[in-house]
């Protein structure tokens, strides 16, 4: 597995976020794997690792509980360091990074040495300019063999952050990248609808929308604003169902 990743490259790009709707530069070009390792001291309060659970509903609940514990611990450290927003930016970088299947498989592979994974984390932390406690947090996940929970931890961290800061998360999906002023207008509208103090915007692309955009917000994205051409076409198609058409004789 490690040899097959030798020349793999993952291009990591930050997601536009935060209440000021800032667009970040690409984070890093990542080559897997790295070689030498220099040990560093951990300064993050560790969450007690749980044993890897089996499948089924019980396993899912155990993983969800562990992800919540890790996310809460990271948020506590970030809050105490007065770096909550910076840590949130780190977490979004990690979400993009570990969404790459090659990266996720490499770190989840038990046959890859922990030392090699740690060294690669050093490279990522340097290239991505991660907070020291974010880097140490990744060390803990690797050492406790819980790095496979990273995506779940990201989701749980977002919930913790939103609660701490009275922030509403809005996911904007469009065909092409929207301009920052358009995202700011969407954020203001979501703020009016929810009454939240802050609004964070995440963006993603979906060519199937044809044109326009959609906005998901609320608990687990339960509320939807659909301004896409796709929806309009579907509504037109529904009105033109053969059974609804009366032909003049």
Image (tube, rainbow, N blue to C red):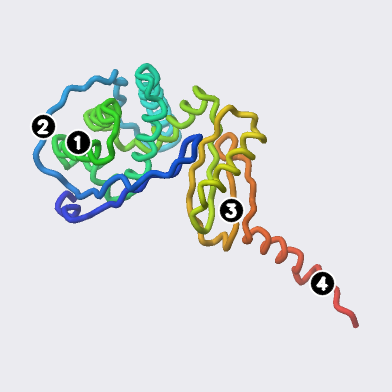
Labels 2 and 4: the sequence-earlier one: 2
Tag 2 and tag 4, C-beta contact below 8 Å: no
What distance separates the C-alpha of mark 2 from that of mark 1? 9 Å
In screen coordinates, is 101 left or right of 116? right
Labels 1 and 3: the sequence-earlier one: 1
What distance separates the C-alpha of mark 2 from that of mark 4? 73 Å
Q: Which residue is mark 2?
A: 38
Residue 126, position in %: x, y? Answer: 22, 37
Tag 2 and tag 1, C-beta contact below 8 Å: yes
Q: Which residue is mark 4?
A: 245
Closer-to-camera residue (12/150): 12
In screen coordinates, is 134 left or right of 156? left
Give the quadrant of residue 199: top right
Residue 74, position in %: x, y? Answer: 36, 24
In screen coordinates, is 66 left or right of 203? left
Mark 1: give few (<14), some (14-19) or many (20+) Cα within 10 Å. many
Q: Which residue is mark 1?
A: 122
Residue 226, position in %: x, y? Answer: 64, 51
Tag 2 and tag 3, C-beta contact below 8 Å: no
Q: Pick out the residue farthest to the right.
A: 249
Labels 3 and 4: the sequence-earlier one: 3
What distance separates the C-alpha of mark 2 from that of mark 3? 47 Å
Tag 3 and tag 4, C-beta contact below 8 Å: no
What distance separates the C-alpha of mark 1 from that of mark 3? 38 Å
| Of labels 1 and 4, the one closer to you | 1
Q: Residue at x 40, y 25 (%)?
A: 84
What distance separates the C-alpha of mark 3 from that of mark 4? 30 Å
Labels 2 and 1: the sequence-earlier one: 2
Labels 2 and 3: the sequence-earlier one: 2
Q: Which residue is mark 3?
A: 213
Closer-to-camera residue (57/216): 216
Q: Looking at the image, is 4 positioned above or below residue 197?
A: below
């Amino acid at each position: 597995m490690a040899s097959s990743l030798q020349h793999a490259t993952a291009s990591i790009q930050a997601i536009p976020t935060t209440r000021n709707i800032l667009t970040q530069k690409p984070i890093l070009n990542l080559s897997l794997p790295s070689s030498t390792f220099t040990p560093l001291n951990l300064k993050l309060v560790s969450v007690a690792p749980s044993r890897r659970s089996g499948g089924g509903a019980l396993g899912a609940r155990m993983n969800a509980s562990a992800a919540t514990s890790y996310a809460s611990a990271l948020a506590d450290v970030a809050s105490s360091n007065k770096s909550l927003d910076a840590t949130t930016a780190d977490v979004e970088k990690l979400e993009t990074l570990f969404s790459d299947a090659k990266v996720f498989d490499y770190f989840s592979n038990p046959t890859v040495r922990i030392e090699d994974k740690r060294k690669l984390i050093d490279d990522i932390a340097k290239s991505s300019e991660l907070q020291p406690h974010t880097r140490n947090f990744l060390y803990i996940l690797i050492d406790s063999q819980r790095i496979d929970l990273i995506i779940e931890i990201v989701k749980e961290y977002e919930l913790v952050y939103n609660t701490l800061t009275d922030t509403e998360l809005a996911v904007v999906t469009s065909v092409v990248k929207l301009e920052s002023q358009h995202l700011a207008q969407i954020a203001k509208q979501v703020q009016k609808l929810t009454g939240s103090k802050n609004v964070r915007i995440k963006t993603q692309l979906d060519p199937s929308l044809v044109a326009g955009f959609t906005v998901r917000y609320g608990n687990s994205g339960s509320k939807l604003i659909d301004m896409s051409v796709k929806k309009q076409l579907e509504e037109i198609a529904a009105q033109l169902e053969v059974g609804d058409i009366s032909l003049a004789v």
